[in-house]
Image (tube, grey):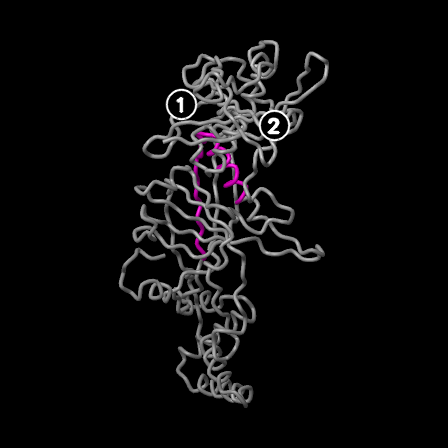
Amino acid sequence: MSTSANSPSWVRTYTRDDATKYQIAYRSNNTWRLDANGKAVSGSFTTNLQVDRTAIDAGVTGGGVNATWTTAATRGPGASGIWDRKYIDDDADLGFALPDASWSDLNDRSSNFNSQINTISANAISKYFRTLGFGQGGGLSTQIGAMRELSKSQGSNSQGDASDETVGGNKTTLTKLSDEIRTKPRDRYMSRYTYYYPVQLKHNYDQDKLQISVLEYKPRPIGEGSPSGLGIGEREGYTSRVLGSVFLPVPGNVSDSNSVSWDQDTMDPVKLLASDAFFDNVQKGDGAIDGLADTLGQIGVSVGESSGGVKEAVAAALAKAATGGSILTRSTGKIINPNMELLFKGPQMRTFQLAWKMSPRSYEESEMIKKIIRMFKQSMAVKRSESQLFLKSPNTYKLRYMTARNKEHGFLPKIKECALTGCSVNYTPDGNYQTYENSSMVAYQMTLSFNELEPIYHDDYYKLDQDRDESIGF
């Protein structure tokens, strides 16, 4: 099985014996074999130089919409850089498809014709492999890689300049990916595809992975969620807010730490009596203040009627509060029982720090890494309103550990919606500056710091699987 890629047409100008000039239209048709997996077979590339025969016979510039292309010369695998001139068909009497002037031009070592053909062929091949998406190019999605493959397949014969992207005086620009062509501020990532590193992860069904999705930030609604109208509602689900996703290998530092804030608390007898009176009476509604005054008066009467120990404790507590002096301890060697107890203070937010070392192994992978780092850097940046009077919240993130079959992992922790509080990139993680031929770093170290937006609550576990214990939980 084989496939092909055609280049744009171009023309060259020639001079007749009578000094008049004419043009011939050309096109490069490039073919190669595919293996059983649909991958290009290295060393199988053929370049066919085609001419618009109808246009030539009519004496006009060819290559238009109605062009009739005929293969005029071929250079295939093992050709050692030598062109094979083709007849119009198998009957040699009809003559060659390639005019004599073109054949002479093709074999003139002082001409740039060979270089021009190979340069535009490499452009066409790299353009084709770029349309396949990341991980599909096999190193052929750059002009340099395509030129190298042409030389490997066909031998060297003025194989062109891999940095020369001008053909026939016109700048040839390779097609850009759709999410790179924008005339308005970006609001999505990976509008055409999901990001992967390594790129083979997309087709690897034997490896667990971490999916990180960029979300549009939505605040929790206020005034919803309780009968009093004083509560805060649930945040909008994340699936409708996804702006882009990346799949990464599960990092080597997976851990979580769940904690709750508890702190010691003390309460002497005076505080205990006053606090209890205040708490009870505030809940009474109307007349609460009058009731509080009556209760405090009753407490005073009760203290007066109590035993000496109670009076001593209350007196010592009041003296301590008024003067700061510990008269009870100084005079008796005793202290008031502080009624010390560890009391719940509140939940604590969890933080996660994840790190990856990413080393591109192809052009596609270097471009993918660049886009992944850009996605995190840009999506975590603070936004400005159009008037620039206000600052808006950055994007938020959803992290999900996935099994090889793209099911949520039951043996790794669930993570609530997060904010990205830090993105650190080391461009020389091996301690020295090294780049590939396309200027990509040979390795990157990316470290991401996430904070959950909400604490973990007891009922979150029930919502997760109705307490069937199907996963390890948060």
Q: Give coordinates of residue 8: x percent, y percent.
A: 57, 31
Three-letter residue code for mark 1:
Ser
User: Quarter of the image holding residue 390?
Assistant: bottom right
**Looking at the image, which residue is at 38% across and 32% down?**
39
Q: Is residue 192 above or below residue 117?
A: below
- Front residue of this view, candidates 208 and 416: 208
Q: Give coordinates of residue 153: x percent, y percent.
A: 43, 19
Position of 402 with respect to 468 (left or right) is: right
Residue range of the region highlighted in magenta in the rendering: 349-375
- Please tell me whether mark 2 sits on a helix, a strand or a loop: helix
Q: Is residue 71 above or below residue 210?
A: above
Give the residue at the far top of this rendering. Answer: 109
Q: Where is mark 1, residue-wise? A: 44
- Residue neighbourhood size for the residue with mark 1, other residues' Cα within 10 Å, grouped as few (<14), some (14–19), many (≥20): some
Q: Is residue 332 above or below residue 396?
A: below
**Looking at the image, which residue is at 50% across and 58% down?**
241
- Front residue of this view, candidates 108 and 227: 108
- Please tell me whether mark 1 sits on a helix, a strand or a loop: loop
Query: In the rendered image, which quarter contains the C terminus?
Result: bottom left
Q: Where is mark 2, residue-wise? A: 55
What is the spatial separation of the Cα atoms under label 1 and label 2, in whole angstroms? 31 Å
- Front residue of this view, candidates 332 and 16: 16
Q: Give coordinates of residue 180: x percent, y percent.
A: 58, 42
Q: Give coordinates of residue 261: x percent, y percent.
A: 42, 60
- Residue neighbourhood size for the residue with mark 2, other residues' Cα within 10 Å, grouped as few (<14), some (14–19), many (≥20): many
